[in-house]
Image: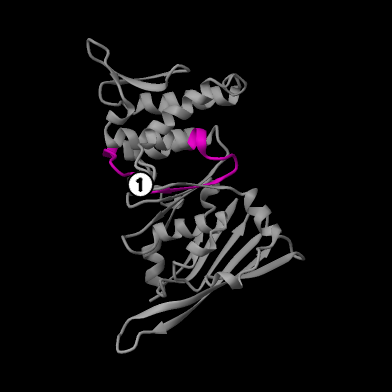
Amino acid sequence: MLTSISITKLFNLYTYNLDLHTEDSNVCFITGPNGYGKTSLLNILNYIYSGDWEKLTRIPFEKVSLTFSDDARFSITQERKYLQEIESDERSSETVSLTIDFQLTSSDLYSFEWTNVAESNIVPDKNIELFFESHPVYYIRDGRLYSPDRIPTITRCVKDMRGFLNNSSLAETPQFKEKVEVFKKIISTSDFADKTLQIDARYGFRFILNNEDKTILSPESLSSGEQHLTVMAFELLFMAPDDSLVLIDEPEISFHMLWQVDFLKNLDLILAVRKLQCIVATHSPQIFNMKWKLSVDLFTQAGLNH
């Protein structure tokens, strides 16, 4: 489990030290106004865990350090060399270098360097790759309703559920049945407007209008808030890998206040059947029911830097 994040000079401005092990909980909420780096922190974690060093060079910082509950430590130092434009106050980045240090135990230290000048790169140490393969990441972004090719995410969820239900070796396991029951409970207690959830191997899942004709709705016809809630619940229950770090950006999007207040309760239901760690970036304290001990605030820490 990731226990802390330290970042120095994010955007050449902000230094943060974030303790993620709040109240012995597997969830931590990152708060703060726009522009203080909530999403950038999620992106940095995603790039580190997935080994996307090139995208990591696009975010300016001085150093990022991660500590884990198994005493592993990981740090990245970034050095940016700029090319000054002639007769201009603008400058463009010429090279960005990363120095990566990974300490698995007190005696095992692995290092390598990476730069955005591709021909100078070396293959990362296998121990680092193996470590993050055993510590997967899953990112639920703020633009979660559509895939990059603009296919509604909920359409993919319906297809995936149909595949799961038609896989008898999976669908008959107690663990899968337990996840399905939690999914049903979250949807039913959220009181979708005059709609009832149905789950079956023939169609995955669908919604029926509570009218005289019992009209079958296409999943894409749900409201944006209903789709957000359904997609997040589905991905947390069925798609995030076991033992993964789940990053959730702005879960409150399109949520009525009552759904915001219910978010932590629903997340607790999910974490009762899934072994996950969640880091949630949010503007809404209602998302964590004003339980400030579950949160770290970037604005407060930024103020301490000045």
Q: Going by the image, does 258 lie left or right of 21?
A: left
Q: Going by the image, does 104 lie left or right of 208?
A: right
Seen at 67% across and 69% down, the residue is: 111
- Residue 29 lies in the magenta stretch: no
x%, y% of residue 243?
60, 43
Q: Residue furthest bottom?
A: 87
Q: Which segment did they paint magenta?
A: 236-258
Q: Is residue 268 above or below residue 215?
A: below
Q: Is residue 82 above or below residue 22?
A: below
x%, y% of residue 286?
33, 45
Q: Nearer the viewer, residue 50 or 247?
A: 50
Seen at 40% across and 74% down, the residue is: 13
Q: Residue furthest right?
A: 107
Q: Residue furthest top?
A: 212
Seen at 43% across and 34% down, the residue is: 233
Disc tally is 1
What residue is pinned by disc 1?
A: 143
Which picture quadrant has residue 170?
top right
Identify the element where label 1 is drawn: loop
- Residue 244 lies in the magenta stretch: yes
Q: Nearer the viewer, residue 73 or 79?
A: 79
Amino acid type at image mark 1: Gly
Q: Is residue 258 above or below residue 118?
A: above
x%, y% of residue 215?
26, 16
Q: Quadrant of the C terminus?
A: bottom left
Q: Going by the image, does 105 lie left or right of 296?
A: right
